[in-house]
Each structure stands twice: as structure tokens, then as C-alpha cells.
Image (cartoon, rainbow, N blue to C red):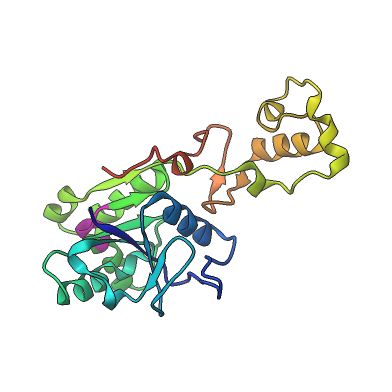
């Protein structure tokens, strides 16, 4: 089985070997690290970190690794680097946000070719549909027909949406309530009411930087490991 190598240019690894930051990208990198055995996070140094190895792209064993690329425009470049060091490069895209409408044609075509050439896993059905449309619009039919796209609704954790309630509010958790939010949070405090109000209008997802609605998948497939690319 190939080792998973995660590539995201904005990742920051602190001096203690932890993925730093709590934005959507950093959260997803940490999740991928926990989901895989003996993973690699691509970075400038070579060292053992907390649960993973940091390693430059050029140092990867091409025939023993698969690169999950969170920077879709770089997939063809990654393939070329890996091909210089081995016979069978394995690269897949992780499209964890909306596709981009570029002002210039070159990056738009590079993105479309990346989606067409490499298997792509998207963070939602809507994003997956947008990926297919980009490939259909900007590539030839032979490339578009062979595009492999999978998706799962990544969801969110309640503690990423709301701050932890103060101690005085936690005592209400023993009360019974019929509100939809109480079934999730276990209480009928102001925190539940605020969550309900946010849910009705859509709230910003702390994991994926997308809008969540009450119809979103629950619990989070990415956190239960149920989602996979076709």
C-alpha cells in the first residue's frame, strides 16, 4: 500500500511538529493525517513530526506514495517531479472549496486539465458538479469523458461554529427541549437558540469554509471516514 503524502502550500508546521492554525485548510490537513497510516506532509524540511513525516516533494519515493494535492493548479507539476524519480506517479486532487473563474485563460485551462487528468475528490456534490462542468467546458471530449470525480459532504463540528458555553449555561443541559438544536447540543440555553437562528439562515462551516444548511449531511462523513472518491 502506498503512503499518503498531503500537499498544501499554506500548511504551517510548528517547532513541536504540529499542524498550526484552525482555518479550513489546516483542519483538513490534520484530518487527513489522522485518517491515514504513516502519512507525509510535504514541506521544506525533512523531520519526524507528531504523527507524520515532513518531507520535500523531491524526496518522495514515487512508486511508494500517492500525493493528495490541495493546490489543484500544481498537480501537473507534481506529476513531473515524481516522474523524474520513478515510473508510476500517483496524484489526486482534493477540491476542498469552490472552483475558480480565473480572469486569465492560462490558469483556467490548467485547472480544467488538472481535473481531467487526475482523480478529483470534492467537498460536496455541488463542487463535484462544478468540477465536471469546468472539465466539459475547457477540455476536449476525450478528456472530459475520462474525468474521475468523487465527493462527500464534509460537514462541521458544533464546537467549530459556537464558542464553548460558560459554566453557568451548562447546567441547563439537563432540561428537556423540543427544539431541533437541543437534540444536537443537549440543552435549551441561549447557545442552542443562537445555533438554531444561525442554522435557519445558513452558517459558515468551520471545517470547509462553505455554507451549511439544516439539510447538510450529519454526522460529518469526513470525520467518520465514510466518504471516498470513486
> In the displayed structure, would residue 137 be above or below residue 85?
above
| Quarter of the figure with residue 77 | bottom left
Which of the pair 97/121 is nearer the observer?
A: 121
Q: Name the residue located 20 percent from the left edge and 59 percent from the top edge.
A: 117
Magenta residues (range): 114-119
Residue 115 counted in the magenta span: yes
| Residue farthest right in this picture | 168
Q: Nearer the viewer, residue 48 or 84?
A: 48
Q: Would residue 219 be visible to someone looking at this image?
A: yes
Residue 55: horizontal and vertical position, in percent? 36, 73
For residue 96, say whether it is visible: no
Asked if 155 appears above or below 32 in the picture, the reply is above
Q: Where does residue 71 sit, x and y in percent of width and height?
A: 37, 66
**Is 98 left, or right, of 198 in this rendering?**
left
Q: Nearer the viewer, residue 106 or 157?
A: 157
Question: How far from the left and from the top, in percent, is residue 144?
Answer: 19, 52
Q: Nearer the viewer, residue 124 or 23?
A: 23
Amino acid at each position: 500500500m502506498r503512503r499518503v503524502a498531503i500537499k498544501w502550500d499554506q500548511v504551517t508546521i510548528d517547532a513541536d511538529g504540529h499542524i498550526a492554525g484552525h482555518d479550513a485548510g489546516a483542519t483538513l490537513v490534520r484530518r487527513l493525517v489522522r485518517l491515514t497510516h504513516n502519512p507525509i506532509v510535504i514541506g521544506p524540511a525533512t523531520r519526524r513530526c507528531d504523527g507524520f513525516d515532513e518531507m520535500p516533494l523531491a524526496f518522495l519515493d514515487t512508486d511508494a506514495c500517492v500525493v493528495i494535492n490541495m493546490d489543484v493548479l500544481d498537480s501537473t507539476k507534481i506529476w513531473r517531479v515524481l516522474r523524474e524519480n520513478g515510473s508510476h506517479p500517483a496524484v489526486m486532487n482534493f477540491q476542498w472549496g469552490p472552483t475558480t473563474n480565473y480572469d486569465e485563460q492560462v490558469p483556467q485551462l490548467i485547472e480544467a486539465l488538472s481535473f481531467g487528468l487526475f482523480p478529483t475528490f470534492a467537498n460536496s456534490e455541488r463542487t463535484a458538479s462544478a468540477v465536471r462542468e469546468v472539465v466539459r467546458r475547457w477540455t476536449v471530449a476525450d478528456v472530459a469523458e475520462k474525468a474521475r470525480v468523487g465527493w462527500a459532504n464534509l460537514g462541521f463540528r458544533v464546537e467549530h461554529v459556537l464558542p464553548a458555553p460558560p459554566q453557568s449555561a451548562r447546567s441547563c443541559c439537563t432540561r428537556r427541549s423540543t427544539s431541533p438544536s437541543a437534540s444536537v447540543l443537549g440543552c435549551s440555553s441561549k447557545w442552542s437558540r443562537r445555533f438554531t437562528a444561525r442554522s435557519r439562515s445558513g452558517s459558515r462551516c468551520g471545517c470547509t469554509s462553505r455554507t451549511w444548511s439544516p439539510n447538510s449531511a450529519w454526522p460529518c462523513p469526513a470525520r467518520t471516514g465514510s466518504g471516498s472518491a470513486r
